[in-house]
Amino acid sequence: MKRVVAGADAFVDGALRPVDIVIENGVVAALVDRGTPVEGAEVIDGSGLTAIPGGVDVHVHTRDPGYTHKEDITTCTRAAAAGGYTTIFGMPNVDPPTMRTDDLTQVLELYREKSLVDYNHNPAAKLLDEISPMAELGIRAYKIYMVVDTGRTYPHPAAIGVHDHGALYQAMQAVAATGLRLMVHPHDQAIMDVVEQEYWKADDRSPQAYARTLAVDDGIIWDIATATLLRLAEATGCKLHIVHAQTTRQIEMIAAARERGVDVSAETNHWTIFLGRWSDIETMGSYALSYWVPDHHREAVWEALRDGTIDMLSSDHAPHTREEKEVGWEDAWAAHTGTPGIQYQLPLMVDAYNHGTLDFARLVDLCATAPARAFELDSKGSLEVGKDADVVLLDLKKVWTIRNEDVLSRIGWTPYDGREIQGAVVRTLVRGTDVYVDGEVVGNPGHGKQAVRAGSV
Ligand SMILES: [Zn+2]
């Protein structure tokens, strides 16, 4: 099958260019001057649109297996397709939690049957003897949660949490030996335990109390954990990926560690930059609240996204039902934390670009190129001859309103309901095949393939 995306401005070699994308056998076969006739090719009309490489989202909670009342791999990847994401990495806090080779084999089989887009899965680096064998299954990273939930059993069950420094040290040595990257949710559980007791004693379990706990001392819960992780990465040689980079001190520490040669990547999530204001906590409670830090950090985060200190954006797509959120008005410690986002993150970023918050090259790097680079997905992340034809067509000018009724995630709600933005995903191709066209998901479960490093599996 030969196709050509014709007439769009294509993001090629670091800039938008009048280039048509010729696709053959699922890969980019050629990049030609706009209007060049391509014999025997089906034409995809990209006039007036902008073509970028498909998004790579390395932090996605599919909830499958085990929590499919919230989401499953098919509903999640339908939302991904509509949101311009062509590759996702799932997380290990499913049931059974992904800690062993058997669990990982089982979950990869589920993706094979159910995913519309390409995928991989990060198992938990919890059981030392299982770390190296799991690398044989083509994964690109492991995950560690330093957070263990109190007051609820999900989404951070004790079974997979690791925050003891000795255990972290050993896990990072074991991951370093595989050469893969370790993704960590930084969190000082010991400080959290002490601080939350104070609110509980005062019988304050409001969303505001929960937010203040996580933000205590201007973000110490994040900063102490990040400092520990960076030092352990330096000691063990473990490639590190820090999720939820959102404080000024985290950003400074990441930059300094890199300068010393530590291989560290970092992500910010949509909720930090688009949903993280105190006013969001006041009005939306647990629906908005993931991990609030004071508003003054936000400009530093945007600056770090612009200058590359935070090198990628991930959705941390975390669907929960309304019931699981509603309880938060009474007891925010009982509400499941996290918020959905994979369907709207890229359009929100285009809207930010339209408002002059960042330039277009940074947008593409944050959403596609940098994650592919950090996790060594050789065939993903840019429009280049020989790479997978994962292409997203954007309408940069379209003004529209995000609505709950359009949510493809099983939970049927978005914290962005009612928000008017400029910039929309029009079409998404995974390896040359349409998965989303003009408001309709057209991809099929089973189309997705495991995204691996060339020659690794
Ligand atoms: Zn997460």
Image: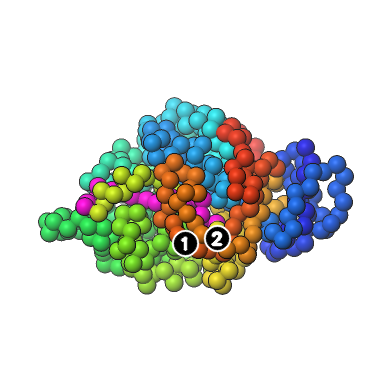
Residue at point 53%, 66% (across, down): 352
Regarding residue 214, the answer to whether it shows in the image is: no
Coloring scheme used: rainbow
Quick check: 239 above or below 302? above
Q: Which residue is mark 2?
A: 400
For numbered disc 2, what is the local secondary structure? Answer: strand
Badge 2: few (under 14), some or many (20 or more) residues near its Cα, within 10 Å? few
At x 53%, y 41%, the residue is: 77
Q: Earlier in the sequence, mark 1 or mark 2?
A: 2
Identify the image quadrant of the N terminus: top right
- Type of the residue with mark 1: Arg
In the image, taking residue 151 as reference, residue 12 lies left or right, namely: right
Q: Residue 278's x, y, as percent? A: 33, 67
The residue positioned farthest toward the front in the image shown: 405
Q: Position of residue 284 (x, y in %)?
A: 33, 59
- Residue tagged 1: 419
* Nearer the observer, 408 or 240: 408
Q: Quadrant of the C terminus?
A: top right
Mark 2: which amino acid?
Answer: Trp
Viewer-proximal residue among 415 and 189: 415
Residue plotted at (28% across, 60% down): 211
Residue 397 belongs to the span the image colors magenta: no
- Which numbered disc covers residue 310? none
Q: Residue at x 57, y 45 (%)?
A: 81
Q: Give the extent of the magenta segment.
A: 330-346
